[in-house]
Image (cartoon, helix red, strand yellow):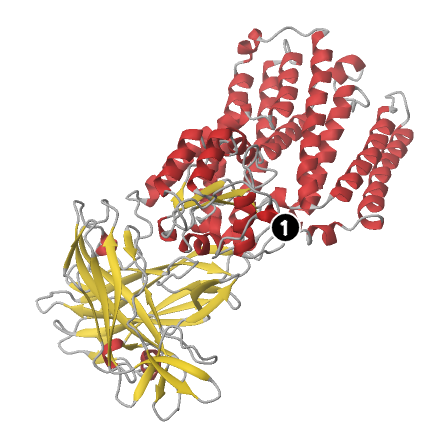
Amino acid sequence: MNIVTALFPLLALFGADGDPNFSVRLHAAHDTLAPGTQTTLAIEINVEKDWHIYHPIIIDTGAPTTIDFDVPTDVTVGLPLFPFPDLDEEYDLEYFSHHGRIIVLTDLELAPDSTLESIPIAVTVSALACKELCVPVTAQARLTIPVAASPKPAADQKSLKQARENLPKPLPTADYLAGSTLRISTDQITVDQEAELLLTLNIQSHHHVQAPNPGVEGLIGARLFIEPRAGLELGEPQWPEPQRRAIPNFGTAREYAGDVTVRVPIIITDPLFPRGPVTLRTLFMYQVCSDAGTCFPPTYAAGQVSFNADTPNEPTPADTEPGQSLDSASTASTSDTTSQSPTAKLLWNLVLGFIGGLLLNIMPCVFPVISLKIISFVKQAGEDRGRIFRLGLVFCAGIMVWFWIFAWITSIGQIPWQHPPVVISLVAILFLFALNLFGVFEITLPGQASTHLEQAAAREGYPGAFIKGFLATLLGTACTAPFFASAAAYASTQGLLISFVVFTGAGLGMSSPYVILSAFPRWLSALPKPGPWMVIFKQAMGFVLAGTAVWLLLTVADLLDARGVVWTVALLGFVALAAWLIGRINLAWSFRARLITWLAALATVAIGIWFCFFLMYDINAANSSGHAAHTTRADLIATVASDDWSDHIPWQPFTPGLPEQLANDGYTVYVDFTATWCVTCQTNKATAVDIASTRALMRDLGVIPLKADYTRTDPEIRKILLAFEHNSVPLNLVYPANHPENVIKLPVVLTPGIVSDALTKAGPSKTTPDPFPAAQPASDSAPHPL
């Protein structure tokens, strides 16, 4: 039986579209440039159809598109200006997106005293491309502009003109807002110093702008969007009291006219915020109507606001003021504050992968199969040293093959355990191995020991060694060790090549003990000598393998339903019959008799698959149903408040955007991204989260617990995991009341102290002095107003 060949069709079932086509080209408004002059650079970004990337201003979800320049020291590059974005919404989450061909413009200036003969320019664009799943993408482009006595305009000025027209107008020259300004109340901000971003609108006479809540259906309210920065807290915009206008047959409209000032509190909350100049992009969305009653389509005005961060830290390249040399600077977002170089990150995650792979050998899912290898080591005592080493290498080859397959699966954003055919196949394989250990069947292959049948049955063959290595690693993917989880999360955001390197390191870590033991068989002398104990040990391991198969049935139940479990067990009956047929084979039989019996066994399994999952049960229909029903926030709060919390946490179903909404409403929120097949998730829950001390603290603080179930494939949860640099679960987040932007990310492996520290740091819910005043039946408890 070749399990590798058998699993490849299953792997194909959860293939993805792969990485989207993503490319960048660089153009300039001048073919040559003179010292002391400037030109416009056009960064042409092309995204594959049906995919989108995000604007640098992030609203509810997404990752900012960043543009890094590499130019000589006497060349300065300004802040890249993006065209009008699309304001999209999914699952109540808003985001600015760009599709197709995008032209970003910026200014480049050559110093008056420059002696350059040409200007080499390199640009790197990094983005998160999303369709059903999100994939990090990067592309580069280069351009060289000769230096001459006088600048020479490029021939194609029409395209540049069109690109400029696609940019939102600057706030001071925006339609009907000429003379409007944007500034910070102070030029310099220290840590915890209160300051304000001030938007002053100069609305053209005889016109008005709709208030954020216009009060009349069909009118578009004004909104101010500000580029977020890690460690910089932006409060809600404070709008002045609007004017009211009665519109016959429509109601009363709220609007602004004349000079209007909008105030946004701004404060540096993180002492580690980099010192130096900071520039923030803004977009002001507004709809103008004339006093005569004519309303124009809503549009955007772009703004930039700068201040100096007076913190104890050194400035980083991402905080360089536009206009400074970008030899080592960039206009990238500061969302990634790590100072590690890409090479250092890769080496560090390679080490983590190796350690994690080594630890996989002692994980509970892997042990049943590893124990089979230990038995084979005992059997090999006294055999040819070269053969022992070759069998060890073949076992390790099985380990490496699955790690390489897993690297590919990870790079395309898929998880095998989310697909019922894969899990059901593993249940059947484990059950088959258990039957083998119970003695229902033995596969004996005549070979060098054909004259000694007992020895032939006892010796391990190369196919068996490979299958054991492959299966042990396949099972290990559901028992991910902590270090390996971190390395896998990093690899999932770095593309196929880096993913392949990191997973190779993990494979070397897991296989290294077997290479060493196979190379130095004398070390095996510490193992017990072969004897009757091996029969008992084999049968005991059979029960362990059968228990692992039963545990996997929990995943089948969550992926499908109770009937799915019943028909999976029914399939095991066909597998058992096939194994019994194979067990009847005797080496004294003719080749024809053995072949007929094998074909009958395979036909039995094929009939079982058809009968259970095509005739009697529809996997696809069951896997597409069963999602949690949506409920109102008020009902959700009432359910949590009415529970007694004595023996369980009253988890509520997670939906994208819900934690932010609850936090904005004054509730502290705990979100557990988990899955039935994730052993680390279940261990965290049993030892650190759903325990008496944590439950008591959550209830005292008025925490709302949300469960984000990733047992099934969920593109929206996948996006959130990637945003927090995770490729899979577990992920635990705490959203402080009234400050969802200060979300606390917990480590992969939790302890009661880690969870309690995070909850204490987040603080209690701010809705009432006691959000959960008493544990009462749901019918007697009033919903908390949201």
Q: Quadrant of residue 172?
A: bottom left
Q: Residue furthest bottom?
A: 292
Residue 641 placement (x, y as % from top left): 52, 45
Determine whether 747 is above or below 80 in the image. above
Using a 10 Å C-alpha cutoff, classify the residue at mark 1 as few (fewer than 14 neighbours), some (14 to 19) or many (20 or more). Answer: some
| SS class, disc 1 | loop
Position in image of residue 188 (x %, y %):
14, 57
| Residue positioned most to the front | 780
Position of the N terminus by quadrant: top right
In front: 513, or 349? 349
Residue 108 visible here: yes
Point 72% across, 39% down: residue: 425
- Identify which amino acid the numbered label 1 is placed on: Phe
Q: As drawn, which residue projects farthest toward the left?
A: 113
Tell me if 766 is positioned left or right of 441 in this view. Answer: left
- Write down the residue under mark 1: 14
Residue at the location (39% across, 52% down)?
Answer: 740
**Vertical side of 709 occupied by 452: above or below:** above
Where's residue 457, x and y in %?
76, 17
Residue 412 visible: no
Total residue callouts: 1
Q: Quadrant of residue 108?
A: bottom left
Residue 85 x %, y %? 40, 71
Using residue 58 as the reference point, say whether residue 592 is left or right of it: right
Q: Nearer the viewer, residue 89 or 241?
A: 241
